[in-house]
Amino acid sequence: MTHLANGAWNWASTIHTIMLREVRCRFAGDPLGYAWTFLVPLLWIGTLMFFFTLLGRTPAIPVDTPTFIATGVVPYVLFRYTITSMSRVASTHRHLVNFGGVRVSDLLFAAALLEALNAIIIFVMIWVLISAIFGPPPIHNPLEFINGLLLTAVFGAAVGRFAAILGMVSETAKRMVPVVLRPMFWISGIFFTAPELPSSLLPYMQWNPLLHAIEITRSGVFLDYSSTFANMAVPLGVSAVFLIASYVMQTAFRRSRDGMELT
Amino acid sequence: MISLLNVSRYHPDKAQPNIILNNVSTQFPRKESIGILALSGAGKTTLARILSGVERPDAGHVRHHKSLSPPLGSTAGFHAGLSGAENVRFLARLLRRNVTETTDYCESFADIGAYFHRPVGQYAPVMRARLGFAFSMSVEFDTYLSDGITSAGDHGFRDKCEAALLERLTRSGLILMSRHARTLNRFCTKFYALHAGQLLPCSSSEEAQDILDYAGGYGNTYWNEAARHAG
């Protein structure tokens, strides 16, 4: 039992160290440093608000525009950052496998956990900012809201794991991942709700796990919005497929392009 | 004790696999200084990675104890954007060593002045090598692993490195892979020749050199063919 507890403690310490190293390394040399992680989502919200105003667009549900956009941007940022971060740590910190029994799986787990923590900080920052300007936006159903973010984190981690392993075995695939993911910004409900979509698109969009997760998040935040579209089985199911595929790939290839063990 | 049991490792090649280790079984005692003589390209780095557990063999098993060092003098774990001090702190944490003691030792041993607190990306190669070796010496291991490196940096610092390593070997072991018999003689007491996928025990580094000379260096295909047939 003590041996098990020691092992768990050592593993947690390793994950913590990798997370700290990633925080220090990510924007090393930049004067704003890690603050970029939190500034970029705020800039996205500001840009989307600008376009909403420019086009005279209002949210389909009776809520203020910043909160509506924030409930789309925060899950999207969590999803996208998780994938980017997991793909990056696999190369940035790969030499750590020589030190203290660090494995590729540890690097990927640390990256996913760090992004989940970042998303919490980003959400708190946005919530405080909106509260200061427009008054505190109530979260109608906190559990449903957390569920939405958790589903996003799990989906991001599953796709991130798949993308990271794929990138380690194929340079071409590594370059393709951001290209393939780019449309997700436009089709995941960041600036619209599912009921606004043309009915002809719904059969296709129901296969987008991120749209379901954002709909669940919004249902948790807004009193007047309960999505009939959202189904948590979609993000969970698709995440399971990506996770299984990543493990199959890990077992099949065993080693990365540079001979590193994919354990 | 580090044990290799029926270990095989091949590098894929279009024509035929390049044999690095072919059904090798041997044991390296924990605190003994082992020298492995091999030609360039014979698989020294691959063997070092297999021994350290970073790479798994294609067949067979490797058992290694927990107190085996990362490759001696390696700078691969340093991130260019972090200072020398930060890099050392993170690596010490990963190896579960006292962070303050390790950092102080590295700062003193590497002797690179204020650069220790500047990003490693700004270092000259010699300074980076100094820090790499300082970190290797800052952490006590039962067995040190070296892929040919026994010192680093400029002439004066090389002497300091070798003296530190020799002192450390009074209480620790070493597995040193090199293509220079003289280097092995200086640090090791037991010798092997790595050729055609086989680790051949030798009574001296000269005997190991003779085996490689007899095998005919890079051009000889006899041993490779023999190993392939055996495999």
Image (tube, coloured by chain):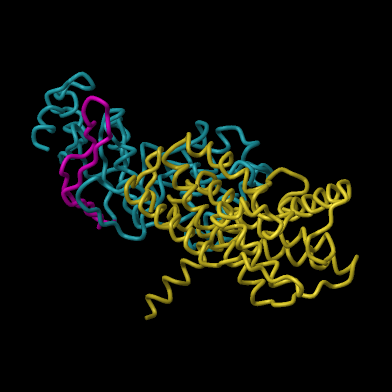
Chain colours: A yellow, B cyan
Q: Residue furthest front?
A: A200
Q: Is B84 positioned to the left or the right of B43 in the image?
A: right
x then y, percent, for residue A110: 54, 59
Is there any visible trace of residue A53 in the rendered image?
yes
Q: Residue furthest top?
A: B219
Which of the 4 image quadrants contains residue A123? Answer: bottom right
Which of the 4 image quadrants contains residue A60? Answer: bottom right
x then y, percent, for residue A210: 60, 57
Quadrant location of the C terminus of chain B in the rendered image: top left
Q: How many marks?
A: 0
Magenta range is: B1-30
- Does residue A26 show up magenta in the picture? no
Q: Look at 39% across and 79% down and name the residue there.
A: A2
Vertical placement of residue A204 versus A60, above or below: above
Which of the 4 image quadrants contains residue A100? Answer: bottom left
x then y, percent, for residue A91: 51, 44
Q: Main secondary structure of the magenta part?
A: strand
Vertical placement of residue A247 versus A63, above or below: above
